Image (tube, rainbow, N blue to C red):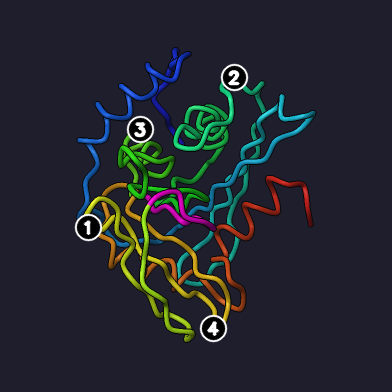
Amino acid sequence: MKIAEITTWPSTFQEAKVLQETLSCRVVRRDHFQVIHRVAGIDVGFEDGNTITQAAVVVLEFPSLVVLEQAIARRPTSFPYVPGFLSFRELPAVLDALQQLTVTPDLLLCDGQGIAHPRRFGIAAHLGVLTDVPSIGVAKSILVGTHDDVPEERGAWRPLWHREECVGAAVRTRAKTRPLYVSIGHRISLETAIDYVMRCTTRYRLPETTRHADKLASGRR
C-alpha cells in the first residue's frame, strides 16, 4: 500500500494540538467510497517498557471476514503517552505497517477514537486523512462524551454526545456485554460506520478486524 512519506512529526504537545486543529477540518463526515471488498483492523502494542511501538494491520475479505494479509512494524516510541495525543505516538509505526501491505484496504477500523475526541481528531480520523482511506474509530472506552443507557440486545446503540454535538455512538456489539464506542474517522457517516462494525462482528464483543489486529499487536495466538 502506497503511503505518502511524512518526514517530521510534532515534538511538543502545542505543535500536536495545532496540527490536530488544522487537520480536523479535512475530515469528511459522509459516505464517500465505492463497494467495500477488504477491511483492515489496526492495533498497536508496546515492547521493552514502552520504548518500542509495535503496530499490527490485518486485512480481511469482506463480507466473509477471511484473513487475506497481515503486517507488523516496529519502531522506537517517539512521543509520550497522553490521552488525546495517541496518534502521534502510534501512527508512525501504523504507517510503516500499512506500507508493507500488497493489497489496499477499502476501509480501516482502528482501535481508538475517530471524531469522539476533544479536537475531533483521534487516531482513526488522523489516519483516514493521511491515507485518504475511509476509516472508523472503534474504541473500548470513552475519551469524551456521555450517552444514555444502551439496551442489552445486540446491535442496540445510543448517541455519544460531547459539547452538544453527536460525536459517536455507544454500540452493543454482543448482548449483555459492555458497549464499544464507534465514531467517524473519515469518508463515512456514523450510521454506516455502525453498520460496518456490526457486520464485522461475529461471536465476540470485538469486531474480527480489531480482534485479529489485537492478537497480532500483542503477540498472542
Q: Nearer the viewer, mark 2 or mark 3?
A: 2
Q: Nearer the viewer, mark 3 or mark 4?
A: 4
Q: Nearer the viewer, residue 108 or 21?
A: 21
Characterize the local packing of mark 3: few (<14), some (14-19) or many (20 or more) Cα atoms within 10 angstroms.
some
Q: Does the magenta portion include 143?
A: yes
Pick whichever of labels 1 and 2 is earlier in the sequence: 1
Give the secondary structure at mark 1: loop
Q: Looking at the picture, which amino acid does disc 2 mark? A: Ser
Q: CA distance from mark 3 to mark 4?
A: 35 Å
Residue identified by numbered label 2: 78
**Is 60 placed above or below 115 here?**
below
Q: Residue at x 53, y 41 (%)?
A: 102
Characterize the local packing of mark 4: few (<14), some (14-19) or many (20 or more) Cα atoms within 10 angstroms.
some
Q: CA distance from mark 1 to mark 3?
A: 17 Å
Q: Looking at the picture, which amino acid does disc 4 mark? A: Ala
Looking at the rendering, the stretch of residues picked out in magenta corresponds to 135-144
Residue identified by numbered label 1: 31
Pick whichever of labels 1 and 4 is earlier in the sequence: 1
Give the secondary structure at mark 3: helix
**Is 39 placed above or below 195 here?**
above
Pick whichever of labels 2 and 3 is earlier in the sequence: 2
Q: CA distance from mark 1 to mark 4?
A: 28 Å
Q: Residue at x 44, y 45 (%)?
A: 104
Q: What number is the disc on residue 175?
A: 4
